[in-house]
Image: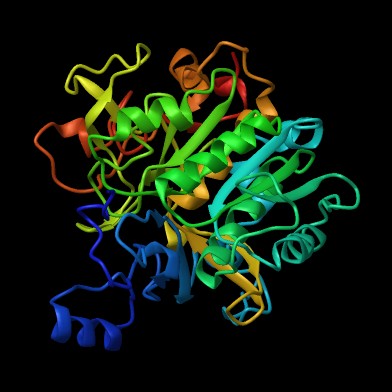
């Protein structure tokens, strides 16, 4: 039976305010999750979404964090342009939107012309009854083409493919679903979106949902959840993730250094997380490893069970190494999301590697259909010069430096880098 990640403490909500931190310390000896960067004294605070703490043993956790206060990187960029940003009151976006993300990852032209005919599948647990309506609000606000059931762009099904017999609704997983759907929209606005809702967040049900997404024709499948590794992982690999010709992305986790599954599957693209900020350099952006504390930041590490795929050539880990690539995940440099189920309807800023996984799945969609016998996780390793190499930061302490520390070339927290156009994700 799968248990929580060893870095994730059951029942713990990460909150960043001083008062909450004091209470948490008094009750449980835990620290804060407040993030302060070097350019402002206004700390960005956040909390893990409810699905980040599994309700039962054997369930997996989502990898998303919702900002609760402070000045985000998007707001600071507004200030730099002479625009006074509004407070995070749910009435106005305070995170990066589609234009920002496409600019950061060199996808402006590809997003305008690519993705047509592709289907990006999102696999999550439980039902979000407001998924289509919230998606419409996000896309309308940012001027993206409508993606609805009526026009054939959006489809929501259960893990058995039913459009009518759906799982029970859950507010926490609905936040995760909104994040995932909005990131696909931001990066690949011309792609179709398939939302597959598992009955519960167990590996068996989520894995069946991955299989259903592939059965329904998706060539790009995003998964924003994980848990601790187990000796059963190799059997899960063959049962749920061995799909040649399909780009399957999995978030690396939000609990800092340490391996998670299914990010450790040899058949998927494991996606780490970065902090993303505007810069005066030629790219216009800069990235570093996302880390908040010793127990919060992007996951990475050497798998205890999964075999090393042939395209990974690092020598410090004899098994599967996490991650392959990365994208924005730091809540302080987070993304805008619209959500209305279970919380006050409005705009929120989210972080976590749950943001990075659908971003990378959507980049694959812009890059084109994978080769029918290919495992697309290998593509970035063949095109490292077409990626942004992230060379600074760490996500914890480790004996083998590159397992947890960024450097030139491959490293665990950020893989071989972040997208710079779509070339790094083509066959």
Q: Is residue 293 left or right of residue 209?
A: left
Q: In the image, is residue 141 above or below residue 273?
A: below
Query: Is residue 360 visible in the rendered structure shown here?
Result: no
* Residue situated furthest left in the rendering: 399
Q: In the image, is residue 148 above or below residue 212?
A: below
**Which colouring convention does the figure follow?**
rainbow
Q: In the image, is residue 98 above or below residue 337?
A: above
Q: Quadrant of residue 238?
A: top left
User: Count of labels shown?
Assistant: 0
Q: In the image, is residue 264 above or below residue 139?
A: above
Q: Position of residue 363 (x, y in %)?
A: 62, 33
Q: Position of residue 49 (x, y in %)?
A: 45, 68
Which corner quadrant holds the C terminus? top right
Give me the residue at 33% from left, 23% from top.
409
Q: Quadrant of residue 41?
A: bottom left
* Residue situated furthest right in the rendering: 151
Give me the residue at 26% from left, 53% from top.
3
Is residue 158 or residue 392 the one in the foreground? Answer: 158
Query: Is residue 324 visible in the rendered structure shown here?
Result: yes
């Amino acid at each position: 039976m799968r248990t929580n990640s060893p870095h994730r403490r059951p029942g713990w909500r990460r909150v960043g305010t001083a008062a909450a931190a004091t209470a948490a310390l008094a009750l449980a000896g835990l620290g804060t999750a407040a993030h302060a960067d070097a350019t402002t004294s206004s700390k960005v605070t956040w909390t893990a979404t409810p699905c980040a703490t599994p309700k039962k043993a054997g369930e997996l956790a989502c990898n998303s964090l919702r900002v609760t206060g402070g000045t985000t990187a998007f707001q600071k960029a507004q200030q730099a342009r002479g625009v006074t940003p509004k407070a995070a009151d749910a009435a106005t976006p305070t995170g990066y939107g589609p234009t920002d993300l496409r600019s950061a990852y060199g996808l402006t032209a590809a997003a305008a012309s690519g993705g047509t005919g592709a289907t990006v599948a999102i696999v999550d647990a439980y039902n979000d009854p407001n998924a289509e309506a919230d998606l419409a609000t996000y896309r309308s606000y940012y001027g993206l083409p409508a993606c609805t059931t009526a026009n054939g762009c959006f489809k929501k099904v259960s893990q058995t493919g039913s459009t009518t017999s759906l799982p029970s609704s859950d507010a926490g997983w609905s936040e995760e679903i909104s994040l995932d759907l909005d990131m696909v929209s931001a990066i690949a606005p011309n792609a179709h979106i398939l939302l597959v809702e598992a009955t519960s967040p167990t590996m068996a049900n989520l894995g069946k949902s991955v299989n259903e997404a592939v059965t329904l024709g998706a060539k790009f499948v995003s998964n924003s959840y994980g848990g601790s590794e187990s000796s059963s992982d190799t059997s899960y690999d063959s049962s749920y993730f061995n799909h040649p010709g399909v780009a399957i992305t999995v978030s690396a986790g939000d609990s800092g250094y340490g391996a998670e599954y299914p990010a450790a599957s040899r058949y998927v693209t494991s996606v780490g997380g970065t902090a993303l900020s505007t810069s005066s350099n030629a790219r216009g952006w800069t990235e570093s490893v996302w880390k908040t504390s010793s127990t919060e930041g992007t996951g990475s590490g050497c798998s205890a069970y999964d075999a090393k795929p042939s395209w990974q050539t690092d020598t410090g880990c004899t098994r599967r190494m996490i991650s392959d690539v990365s994208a924005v995940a730091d809540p302080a440099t987070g993304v805008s999301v619209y959500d209305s189920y279970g919380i006050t309807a409005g705009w929120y800023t989210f972080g976590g590697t749950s943001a990075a996984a659908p971003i990378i799945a959507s980049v694959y969609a812009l890059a084109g259909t994978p080769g029918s016998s290919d495992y697309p996780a290998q593509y970035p390793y063949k095109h490292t010069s077409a990626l942004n190499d992230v060379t600074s930061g760490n996500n914890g302490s480790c004996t083998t430096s590159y397992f947890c520390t960024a450097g030139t070339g491959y490293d665990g927290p950020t893989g071989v880098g972040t997208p710079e156009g779509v070339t790094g994700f083509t066959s």
